[in-house]
Structures are given as structure tokens and as C-alpha cells.
Amino acid sequence: MTADEEARLVAVELASGRVQRYVKTLPKPRSIESVGGMAVVAHSEIGAITIVRGRTLAVAHVLHGFGEPRYTAGHPDGRHAYVSDAARGEVVALDVLEGRVLGRARVGNRARHVTIDPSGTTLWVALGAKAKRVAVVDVRHRSQPRLRGLITPPFLAHDVGWTPDGAKVWVSSGDRNELAVYDARTHKILARPKANLPPQHVTFRGARAYVTSGESATLRVHRTDGRLLKTTAVADDSYNVQQAHGWVVTPGLGRGSLCVLDVSGQLLRREKIARSSHDACIVVSA
């Protein structure tokens, strides 16, 4: 997880909640996403990217020359990644193994949350924290992202997430207690589930969606068709959410908490890890 105010990452063993290691980085690590065996860290305020090896927790590459890198979507091949650059309104294609920029595409002002389909051919990118538009980006040529079109959600959008079966895309709201579930092929809205306070964030495992509301201090478990299954209380300011290997994690912005849940949405532990943490991801380490 990121320790935003301490210029480091904190590696936490999920089974015990114990801190295993600190990884020094450039200042202001803001977002982190696993890509294959690596983790991509965006330092939004200084325009840089750090790439960390998951197994050794060693810094592999540091890349400069970005405007305001925000979030990352990892390609299913485990090598390529796409980073949104809010200041330049771009999506940037990376080779995370070699640590280099492959290409860029202009997609729209304030490009922010980003998701990729399971086949690795298309991105959806929310253009802002309260976005009037979501960009659809073609990445069939992995090093050459290309804007395909724009979608207008029924509210101001915040997060975007592709379901594991590739059939649906969820869009969360930056201004309402509501979500939208899209048909990924036709771009038609299939469902509009109720949600807790905006902004919400979403991740998926199989047929389940996990939706956090940092303002409401909740994690809600839905079926991917939108039906609510469970609501769990988590720490205040638990915004971003990630899942992998049977764990669900949500860190606390401004609080430095880490809530660890199982796949049913049951809270297993809540730990104080840092002064503040904006994001977390799950990797397998040695």
C-alpha cells in the first residue's frame, strides 16, 4: 500500500496484518496497480512512475516526463500497462518489464480512473473525478492506444471497472448514490444499482462486484448484474479497493488504515499502517 506522506510503500502480509517491509520511493506515491509480477506506482504530484518487482519488492525502474499520472490498467499479458495522465489528457502505454514508454494517445481532459477488458483490446477511461464523459480507447495494438469514442453516463462518473467475463462495465458516480452497469458491446445501460455516498470505487472477482464508499465507510458486495448481496462497515475514507488471490483490500486516505476482507465481504482485520494511504494492490512476494 502507498504511504503517501512518507515517500514509501508498505508491504503488509495479509494473513497476519504484519508489516513485512518498507520500500522507499519518490515523494507522493499516490496509486499502485499490479501488472503481472510488477507493481506500477504513480506519483501524480511530481509527474513520475515507479515500477516495483512484486517478488523481491525492489524498485526496478523510475520513469519521468509525465504531467500528472493517476491510475493504471494492467494488460492481461502481464507486460504492458496503460496509465492515465490527467494533466495532459492522455493514456500512456508502458512496457513494465523494460521500464519504458511505448506510446501515448490524447483521450480527453483530466483522464483519471481506467479499466481494461479481459481480452486486452479496449480501455474505458473516466475523464475526471466527476466526469461528464468516459473515453473508449482501442489498445489492440498494445503500444498504440487510439481514442475510439466517448460515452455520456447518466451522472458525473468517477470510477470504471470491467467485469471478469468481459460482458459488462460498471461506472460509479462522483455526484450521486448510484451506479451504472453497461453492456460492454452495445454501451447500453443494463442496470442502475443504488449505492452509498459518492465517490464509489469498484473491483471484481468472478460474478461478484465489490463497491466501496469512503464517505459512508462501507464496502458493498453485489452480483455483477447489480443485485446487492452484503454490506460491510469499513474504516472511514476507505475509497480505493482491490482484490486478488482470495483477498479484498481497501486503504484509508488520510487515515493510513488497511481493511482486509475475504471474498464474501467479511471484514477480517483493520490495521493502522501509515499516516495516509491512497491506494493498495496485492502481489505475491518471495
Image: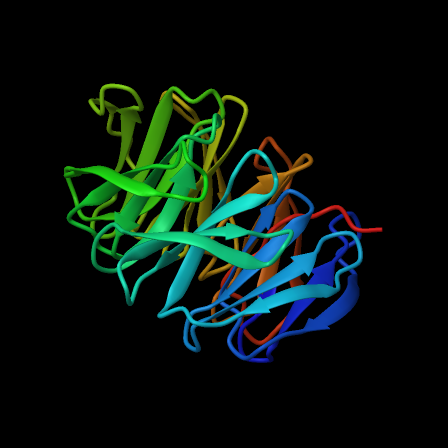
Q: Which residue is depicted at the point 54% across and 79% down? A: 27
Q: Nearer the viewer, residue 40 or 80?
A: 80
Answer above or below: position of 138 versus 25: above
Which color mode does the image show?
Answer: rainbow
Residue 141 locus on image (x, y percent): 41, 35
Answer above or below: position of 147 versus 182: below
Query: Which quadrant, please, contains the N terminus?
Result: bottom right
Number of numbered discs: 0
Q: Quadrant of residue 163?
A: top left
Q: Nearer the viewer, residue 113 or 227?
A: 113
Residue 118 locus on image (x, y percent): 48, 27
Residue 173 locus on image (x, y percent): 26, 46
Q: Quadrant of residue 122?
A: top left
Q: Which residue is most to the right? A: 286
Q: Which residue is depicted at the point 44% across and 78% down? A: 46
Q: Quadrant of residue 80?
A: top right
Give the left or right position of residue 167, taking residue 12 as reference. Answer: left
Q: Which residue is depicted at the point 23% across and 19% down? A: 186
Give the left or right position of residue 53, taking residue 94 as reference. Answer: right
- Whether residue 273 is visible to the viewer of this picture, yes or no, is no
Q: Which residue is depicted at the point 48% across and 25% down? A: 119
Answer above or below: position of 80 versus 187: below
Q: Nearer the viewer, residue 160 or 95?
A: 95
Residue 263 locus on image (x, y percent): 61, 32
- Whether residue 54 is visible to the viewer of this picture, yes or no, is yes
